[in-house]
Image (cartoon, rainbow, N blue to C red):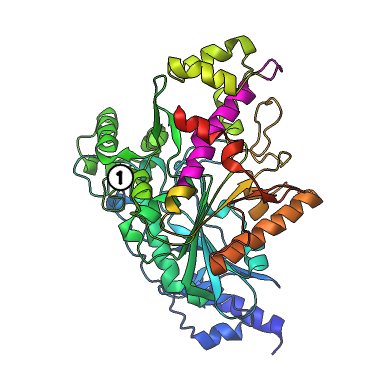
Amino acid sequence: MTRSARKRIWGTVTALAAAVAAVVAVAPASAQAAGDGRVVRTDKGLVAGTVTDTVRTFGNIPFAAAPVGANRWRDPRPAAPWQGVRDATVPSPRCAQVEQLGQPGSQTEDCLYLTVTTPAGRAKPRPVMVWIHGGGFTAGAGADYDARRLATRDDAVVVTINYRLGVFGFFGLPGLPGSGAFGLADQQAALGWVRRNAAAFGGDAGNVTVFGESAGGLSVCAQLASPRAAGLFDKAIIQSGPCGLTTPAGQPGVFATLWRERAAVEQTGAQTAAALGCADVACLRALPVTALLPTHNTFATPAYGTAVLPVDPVVAQRTGRTHHVPTLVGSTHDEATLFTALTFPQPIPTQAYRQTLQALYAPRDVDPILARYPADGNGDVRDELARITTDQSWACTTADTRRQLGRHQRVSGYEFADATVPVLFPDLPPFPGGYRAYHASELLMLFDFPGVTLTPGQRRVSDYMVAAWGRFARTGDPGWRARVQSLAPGAIGATDFERDHHCGFWAQI
């Protein structure tokens, strides 16, 4: 029988199975008969993916039961087994979210799915890399990230996951078990699925790296601090998500870390419930998704003081109460250009520089900051504000994460510093000096995105980074000796990160 004939027969069988919902008893030997490994047996049933000459991709695989109805705001439940062969050629749906930064919205609560990308062909068990997407804990999806380059270049199994977001993932209410941490629990359910099923896709279930960017990086911080994550991963990569990331707290000179106490999240939840006309969680669970989405971005902060996250990750990091696994921690050189442009879309004249700083910092700190970051004379001080925020909130907290985790485990560092990287987000306002190595820009080096073209120099940086991430996943060592490796076209090498970002100065503010 020819290969094309076998494919036609297989297509007929799967179509018939879908039509009649019959049991299709496909043994492992039958999957071999398909000729290319497109059918894999998971612990819940068979999945049929997409196969090319170089890669196999399996999407829309459930790792937990749908968090709908009575399962809304509960820890994830096991997915039900299925009969027949599940179609894994379609992407996983986006979790419910509102449209923002050019990313589409969604009203789908049934979203606890993942995608597996693995090289074609058979080899010894491959390292497994589990990607947690960013998006401020309110947006994004695992399917946004095309992992074929990572999988094929690194000979790795790459798993991109979803988790509940915003009001569906981080809502809290007095008396509600799991308040403020449902999204983190979803991530753990996905990691558990990977441990159980990695081998079926050619992966080494004993060599799992969890990695993520922005909210995904912060999620890695949380998983490092979560007792429930013990044994779920062997290495970690934190990209632009330092555990101690700070933001203004609403009065000059006061900055707060991201994490919130459970009681604070529950109080916000009680206020939200009252505004929605609900006196209890049963009423809230009965509301349609559309009724909850207007409150979505109110719940953009995971809670600690929960079973999933008992301790503030900043405290856990400082006191060594984390999982002691090899960790790679990094950031981009100009993290805050993106956020500054979104906060201040119009130019800020030089004469308003002091006034702007006075709204953010204690009076005694304004003059030292002005002296350290003088206006450059271009008539728009948003670039100075971006440098200040990059250094204080992102770079120096990243250095703190490296230093504190490094007391107990092997830690490596990087900084992505390509000032000419393409801008991934649409319709951003002009920014003085350009966006440079903005927040999330390193993702273009690791994943493929539609419409993005890299220069030959950027492609070389991409190749270097993909190889480094893969080496780290295999061995726990990215391959450089520098404490922090700068990553930019024509300038890959050691950098004096803390001096460049004035971390000694910010330690005194």
Which residue is depicted at the point 46% across and 33% down? 507
Mark 1 is surrounded, within 10 Å at the Cα level, by few (under 14), some (14 to 19) or many (20 or more) other residues, namely many
Tell whether 307 sits left or right of 382: left
Instruction: Residue 108: give x, y in percent of width and height.
Output: 44, 48
For the point 39% across and 50% down, which residue is it? 222
The chief SS type of the magenta part is: helix
Residue 250, placed above or below residue 428: above
Q: Is residue 249 above or below residue 211?
A: above
Q: Residue 284, how many percent across, how many down?
A: 27, 40
Magenta-tinted stretch: 376-401
Quarter that holds the C terminus: top left
Q: Quadrant of residue 229?
A: bottom left
Which residue position is annotated with label 1? 304
Q: Amino acid at mark 1?
A: Tyr
Quadrant housing the N terminus:
bottom right
Look at the image and say whether residue 113 sits in the magenta stretch.
no
**Image coords of residue 473 (percent x, y):** 55, 65
Q: Is residue 355 left or right of residue 263?
A: right
Which residue is the extreme one toward the right? 456
| Residue 337, quarter of picture | top right
Q: Is residue 63 visible?
A: no
Q: Which residue extends farthest top? A: 351
Closest to the observer, 107 or 295: 295
Question: Is 71 displayed left or right of 122 in the figure?
Answer: left
379 in the magenta segment? yes
Q: Is residue 108 above or below residue 188?
A: above
